Image (tube, rainbow, N blue to C red):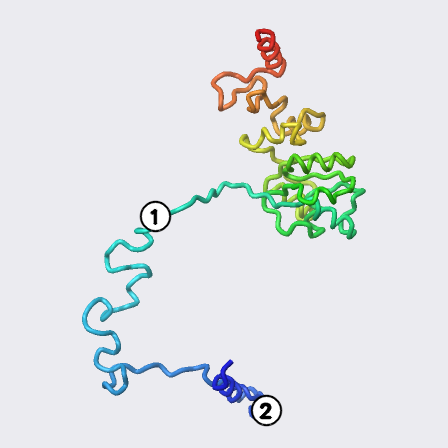
Amino acid sequence: MSSVCYTWVRKGLDIARLPRVKLNNIQDLPGAKKKAVRVGRGPGSGRGKTCGRGHKGQGQRNKNAIRVGFEGGQTPFYLRVPKHGFKNKFQIKYEPLNLNRLQYLIDSGRIDASKPINMHTLYWSGAIGKIEHGVKLLADGSEWFKSKVDIEVSRASEKAIETIEKHGGTIVTSYYNKLGLRVLLKPWKFDDNRMPRRALPKKKIMPYYLNSENRGYLAVTEEGKERLKKGGMEGAYLGPDSMVHIPGKKVTLYSEESPTFVEMKQREAGAETEV
């Protein structure tokens, strides 16, 4: 800070010189208010005759009527320059959680490895700040991970799944929509008698959770079958064409009814014998 500026501040804010604050002497600090510039008061004022607006043109009239970005009628800058890039507003962004971070939280006692770990545990332990769509478990620091855990997340990388199961743990990938996440993270906000039903994944991401390689919660297990039944998709399975099939129901991607699971297996067996 320059000496001139410092001196001005001292003069303006020297508390020792100021009187004691009372209701009848409260006022603005020195320099807080400035007098308005009076225009049209002769050439000596610097704002005489044309009042600083110059000669002729749009600026001589109401300058406030000219909107921001207007360039006198010519093609404005924001239309001349082409747009670049693309932002997908439907993108699902998962919060990343690495194995080394998880191990640190277990070692520091903020997460109990002997109890099941889900996104509620991760959120309230401080492992994740804000969970908008879900959590994805990644394998950074897998060489330091040594705990046996039972964990549920939205998604997980192949190496993360391999590392968790190598140490005797289990991992499940589950889908929660925004309302489902709110129920999971802050259950006290909902009445037990009016708890909302958990939503099934949309058709685009359903194959991920039906795939046992991803440890999906809708894979061919008793619990997975029960979840599908509650969601009105009883018997749904992931076919060899990587599409979700519901026996006896028409799928929008096909004009015919989806084959049953047995028929699909018979077709596969027939194709193998032909080869």
Instruction: Give the image location of residue 146, x and y in percent.
Output: 77, 42
Label 2: state its secondary structure.
loop
Instruction: Give the image location of residue 84, x and y in percent.
Output: 39, 46
Q: Earlier in the sequence, mark 1 or mark 2?
A: 2
Residue 208 image label: none
Asked if 62 appears above or below 237 in the picture, the reply is: below
State the image quarter where residue 74 is shown. bottom left
Q: Residue at x 60, y 23 (%)?
A: 238
Marks 1 and 2 close (CB-CB < 8 Å): no
Tell me the quadrant of the picture where the C terminus can be found. top right
Asked if 194 appears above or below 237 in the picture, the reply is: below
Q: Residue at x 72, y 25 (%)?
A: 222
Mark 2 residue crowding within 10 angstroms, few (<14) / some (14–19) / many (20+): few
**Residue under label 2:** 16
Q: Residue furthest top?
A: 274
Tag nearer the camera, 1 or 2: 1
Residue 82 image label: 1
Could you tell me how far apart the alpha carbons at marks 1 and 2 are, in whole angstroms?
60 Å
Q: Residue furthest right?
A: 114
Instruction: Give the image location of residue 218, x and y in percent.
Output: 65, 29
Mark 1 residue crowding within 10 angstroms, few (<14) / some (14–19) / many (20+): few
Describe residue 71's horizontal placement relative to residue 271 as left or right.
left
Q: Nearer the viewer, residue 110 or 1?
A: 1
Query: Which amino acid does the dot numbered 1 rest on?
Result: Pro
Asked if 229 appears above or below 258 in the picture, the reply is: below
Instruction: Give the image location of residue 247, x and y in percent.
Output: 59, 18
Q: Residue furthest left?
A: 56
Asked if 185 appears above or below 17 in the picture, the reply is: above
Q: Residue at x 47, y 18 (%)?
A: 255
Label 1: state its secondary structure.
loop
Describe residue 63's horizontal placement relative to residue 11 as left or right.
left
